[in-house]
Image (cartoon, rainbow, N blue to C red):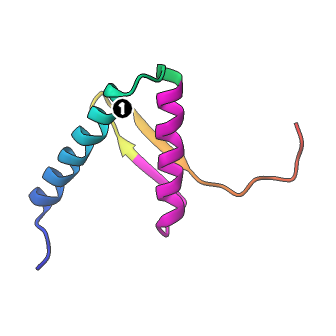
Amino acid sequence: MQNTHSEVEESIKQLTRQICDVINQNPLGLEEKLAAVVMANFEVLIAIPASGVRMNVSDGHTLFVELKQPTSEIH
């Protein structure tokens, strides 16, 4: 049986709350917490057949995270 759209939305909200609780309870600084979240996002992108994720934020902004192969250029 497939989940309904509302069940999926509720599951996403619940997972988001759980992740936020763990982040908020961790003693690391804000930059370190952000770094950990970004690294976790890239691990998820590697695990699924996607090269990027686009999310519309409630304030109208769009967040886009893209996984690319490193270039051979040295800066």
Q: Main secondary structure of the magenta part?
A: helix
Few, some or many residues within 10 Å of mark 1 (<14, 14–19, 20+): some
Asked which secondary structure carries label 1, the reply is helix
Q: Quadrant location of the N terminus?
A: bottom left
Q: Position of residue 14 (x, y in %)?
A: 18, 46
Q: Where is 7 relative to 16, above or below?
A: below
Q: Which residues are magenta?
A: 32-54
Q: Is residue 48 magenta?
A: yes
Tag count: 1
Would you place residue 51 above or below residue 19 in this image?
below
**Closer to the camera in the image, 8 or 37:** 37
Quarter assignment of residue 17: top left
Q: In the rendered image, which quarter is residue 60 located in?
A: top left
Say which residue appears at 13% left-offset and 51% top-offset.
Answer: 10
Picture residue at 47% right of the left edge, 23% below the top: 28
> For residue 5: magenta?
no
Q: Nearer the viewer, residue 64 or 25?
A: 25
Expressed as whole percent of the image width and height from the top left, the position of residue 53 reads 45, 52
Task: Give the farthest residue toward the right.
Answer: 74
Q: Which residue is mark 1?
A: 23
Q: Is residue 42 left or right of residue 74?
A: left
In the rendered structure, which amino acid carries the disc numbered 1? Ile
Quadrant assignment for the C terminus? top right
Residue under the image location 38 percent in, 27 percent down = 26
